[in-house]
Amino acid sequence: MRIDLNGIPTEVAAANLGDALMALGYGSTALATALNGVFISAAARATTLLHDGDRVEVLAPMQGG
């Protein structure tokens, strides 16, 4: 299916957000995620189903000072 990942059309085979993040290389990173503008907690990603055309936003914390 095709999702919009941070504004970029992306093909994924995963059915849920957690599996999609793993497949896209975000597996072990501390992240904030949103699906269609709604925050999704890390605990809910495995049960959050994806649908064709969904908008997924992934934000990783930045370090610096």
Image (cartoon, rainbow, N blue to C red):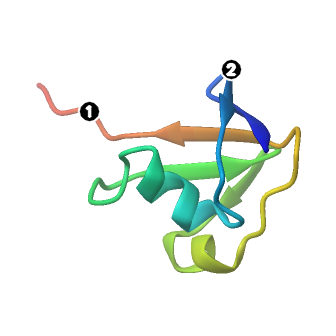
Question: Quarter holding the C terminus?
Answer: top left
- Nearest the viewer among 22 and 65 is 22
Q: CA distance from mark 2 to mark 1?
A: 20 Å
Where residue 46 appears, as percent x and y from the top left, is: 59, 76
Residue at figure coordinates x 54%, y 65% from the top left: 19
Which residue is the extreme one toward the front?
Answer: 13
The circle on residue 7 is 2
Report which quarter residue 17 is drawn in: bottom right
The circle on residue 36 is none
- For disc 1, the marked residue is 62
Question: Quarter holding the N terminus?
Answer: top right
Q: Earlier in the sequence, mark 2 or mark 1?
A: 2
Position above or below: 45 against 60: below
Residue density around tag 2, few if under 14, some if 14–19, many if 20 or more, within 10 Å: few
Where residue 41 appears, as percent x and y from the top left, is: 57, 69
Q: SS for tag 2?
A: loop
Q: SS for tag 1?
A: loop
Residue density around tag 1, few if under 14, some if 14–19, many if 20 or more, within 10 Å: few
The kind of residue tagged 2 is Gly
Q: Is residue 43 left or right of residue 60?
A: right
The kind of residue tagged 1 is Met
Position above or below: 16 against 26: below
- Nearest the viewer among 23 and 58 is 23
Where residue 52 appears, as percent x and y from the top left, is: 88, 45
Where residue 50 appears, as percent x and y from the top left, is: 78, 58
Residue at figure coordinates x 36%, y 46% from the top left: 25
Position above or below: 2 against 42: above
Residue at figure coordinates x 68%, y 66% from the top left: 16
- Nearest the viewer among 47 and 40 is 47
- Do the numbered discs 2 and 1 sit on residues whose CB atoms are within 8 Å? no
Position above or below: 43 against 52: below
- Nearest the viewer among 31 and 18 is 18
